Image (spheres, grey):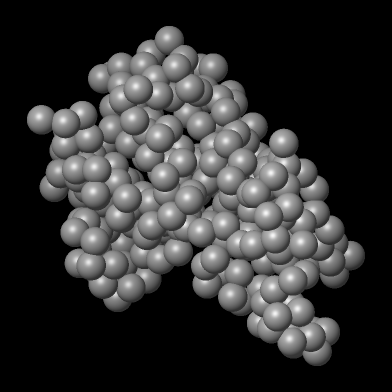
Amino acid sequence: MSWYSRQHAVVTGGGSGIGAAIAEDLVNTGAMVTIMGRGEVRLKATAKRIGAACEVCDVTDRSSVAKAFAAARSANGRISILVNNAGTAEAMPFAKMQDEFWDRLLSVNLDGVFNCTRAVAGEMLDAKSGRIVNIGSTASLKGYAYIAAYCAAKHGVLGLTRALALEFASQGVTVNAVCPGYTNTDIVDNAIDKIMSATGRSRDEAMAELVKANPQGRLVEPSEVASTVRWLCDESSGSITGQAIAVAGGEVM
C-alpha cells in the first residue's frame, strides 16, 4: 500500500483551475480527495471527472466550513492533507477602493485559509502527521500596483504559513506555501478581458502585458503548480516547512 493511498486530502476551490489540477494530481497518486467550493454544479462535475468526493463549502463562512469538513471526515476519514486554494483576484486603484472590496478580498484570500486550517489542525496535531499547503501568489512575495487588497491578503497567507510552520514543526505537521505567477486559468482569462475592455488592446497585446514580468515569457500551467503541491505533500518532504515556493518562471527569486 502506497503512502498516498492512506491519505485523505481536502482541496478548497477545487472545482476549476489550479484547484482542480491539484485535486486530479493527488487522485492520480492514489490519495482519497475531497474537493470543496461554492459552485455545486461545477464542483460535482469536476469530482465526477477526476474521481474525487466533493462538499459544497464557502470558506468565508465558518459554519459552512465546519459542516463541510465534518462531512468530508465522516465520509472518508481523518484529513491528513489540506490544500488551501480557494481565492479570488481583482484589481482596484487604492484611492477608489471601497470597504466592501477590501473586506471581500481579505475574507476569501486570508480568512478562508485561517478558517480551513483551523478545521484540520487539531486532528493533524493529535496524529502528529499532516501536510498543509497554502496557495499564495507572487503577490505574497512582492508588491503590485492596483491590487493592494490582494497583495495584503497573500502576504498575510505567507505570514500565517511561516508562523504555523514553526508552531507545528515538532509535531509532524508541515506548512508551506506555493506562489504561482500568472497561471493559465479562468481568472487570467477574465483579467485579459478587463485589460482589453479598459485599454482597447487586442487579446495578444493584453496577454503580453500579463506575461512580460515572467522571464520565460509565458503563463504558468496549472499542472506545474499541482506537481509542486504534490511534492510538498509527499512522505519524503517531511523536512520542508515554512517555505514559499515560487512557480513563476524566475519572476521572483
Residue 251 shows in the view: yes
Residue at figure coordinates x 30%, y 75% from the top left: 41
**Quarter-of-image position of residue 244:** top right
Coordinates of residue 182 in the picture (x, y in percent): 63, 59
- Report whether 205 appears left or right of 159: right
| Quadrant for the C terminus in the image | top right
Q: Residue furthest top?
A: 170
Q: Residue at x 74, y 77 (%)?
A: 206
Is 111 displayed left or right of 59 in the figure?
right
Q: Is residue 103 above or below residue 225?
A: below
The quadrant in which residue 170 appears is top left
Residue at left 24%, top 61%? 50
Q: Quadrant of residue 37?
A: bottom left
Of residue 9 and residue 180, the one placed in the foreground of this image is: 180
Query: In x, y percent, where is residue 191?
Result: 66, 73
Residue 9: percent from left, percent from top: 29, 42
